[in-house]
Image (cartoon, rainbow, N blue to C red):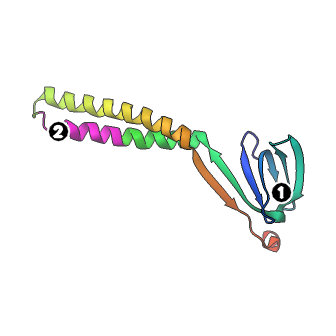
Amino acid sequence: KLQNQSAVVSLNSGQTYNSEQIQLSDTSTMFINQMNDSLFVIRTSDINSIYLKHRTGGALEGFLIGASIGAAGGLIGSMNRGSGAEAKNGQLLSGILGGMVGGVAGLAIGIFKGHEYIFKMPQDSTLLHK
């Protein structure tokens, strides 16, 4: 079940549906077509693929990548400040601030881009029952 998830269902015939509330089983698949809020029930074997874009997953990935790059950039950029305790505190602060700035930027990009999943359906339904 893909309850609160929008997806694009592509059929073997070439038709595509922007859909939600997908319920997938071995023999049939049910979903709501977003264009006219109509309920569709089709054979699962008629589906070529299901495409999902997950914004929360993209946000998490973007934040982690951005924070890592920002922290590394902040640390590397402050390496030539000397070797005393004050210089080490400055390096640490630069790394933390770089991580925060990079994390926020990565979060925004990740929300916008999202994480994409494409599920290709097996065309030989007998494989599902062996």
Name the one closer to the observer, 63 or 40: 40
Residue 79 badge: 2
> Is residue 91 left or right of 26 when viewed as pictured?
left
Q: Element at badge 1?
A: loop
Which residue carries the number 1 mark? 25
> Is residue 63 left or right of 55 when viewed as pictured?
left
> Is residue 122 left or right of 101 when viewed as pictured?
right
- Is 70 in the magenta? yes
Q: Residues within 10 Å of mark 1 (few under 14, many from 20)?
A: few
Of mark 2 and mark 1, the one earlier in the sequence is: 1
Q: How many marks?
A: 2
Alpha carbon distance from label 2 to label 1:
57 Å
Picture coordinates of residue 31, whole percent (x, y): 83, 48
Picture coordinates of residue 63, whole percent (x, y): 46, 38
Q: Which residues are magenta?
A: 69-81
Quarter of the image for the C terminus: give it.
Answer: bottom right
> Is residue 104 left or right of 130 when viewed as pictured?
left
- Is 25 in the magenta? no
Q: Element at badge 2?
A: loop
Residue at the (74%, 68%) spot, across then down: 122
Query: Up-down: is 77 above or below 121?
Result: above
